[in-house]
Image (cartoon, rainbow, N blue to C red):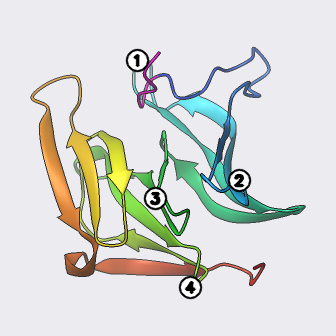
Amino acid sequence: MTKTPWNFSKMNYDGSCVDCTWPSPDKLFTIKYSDVKEIVTNYPLTARSVLMHQNEEILLHIDAGGPPVWSADSKFFALPIWLYNEHGYVQRIGIGCIEEMNFKISTEYFKVMQLLSIDGDTVKLIESPNLKAKERILKINELDFYETVHLKETV
């Protein structure tokens, strides 16, 4: 089954999730989701997300969408970040860099995103995957970021 923003994690009745971990290709890091819920009825999922390394958990965001993507070399990851503003629910993209141990959140707003891939230069995604789908390629060095989370030095 393809994982989409609507089904990237199975929820238990108590709000916990069944398949909420997304390991890096080298298995050294994992993005883990908890408290998974729908934004509103029939909307994509949101959750608290953390970056795990060994026994440490580093909070990425309390309203992350999914599913996240990792680069093939395990150096980069990306995940959608939910927010509510005058346009309703929108997303920004969060880009993590393991080598620099940071997580940056873009200023640009997106409709629902389904991330396809990331490498050191670009993020590929489908915006509005269910209606009027638009494939986009974002150049990371051309994005503006409003927030940078410095992750604990764990490597």
Residue 71 badge: 3
The residue lying at 67 percent from left, 21 percent from top is: 11
Q: Which residues are magenta?
A: 1-6
Q: Earlier in the sequence, mark 1 or mark 2?
A: 2
The residue lying at 90 percent from left, 61 percent from top is: 55
The residue tagged 1 is 42
The residue lying at 14 percent from left, 42 percent from top is: 135
Residue 142 badge: none
Q: Nearer the viewer, residue 59 or 2?
A: 2
- Give the spatial CA distance, label 3 vs label 1: 30 Å
Q: Vertically, is 35 above or below 124?
A: above
Q: Vertically, is 6 above or below 139?
A: above
Q: What kind of element bears circle 3?
A: loop
Which-is-in-front pick, marks 1 and 2?
Answer: 2
Extreme residue in the right direction: 55
Q: Nearer the viewer, residue 102 or 106?
A: 102
Which-is-in-front pick, marks 4 and 1?
Answer: 4
Q: Earlier in the sequence, mark 3 or mark 2?
A: 2
- Give the spatial CA distance, label 4 vs label 1: 37 Å
The residue tagged 4 is 100
Q: What kind of element bears circle 2?
A: loop
> What amino acid is found at the position of numbered circle 3 in the picture?
Ser
> What amino acid is found at the position of numbered circle 1 in the picture?
Asn
Q: Is residue 3 magenta?
A: yes
- Give the spatial CA distance, label 2 vs label 4: 18 Å
Q: Estimate how packed mark 1 is, as few (under 14), some (14 to 19) or many (20 or more) residues with alpha carbons within 10 Å.
A: few
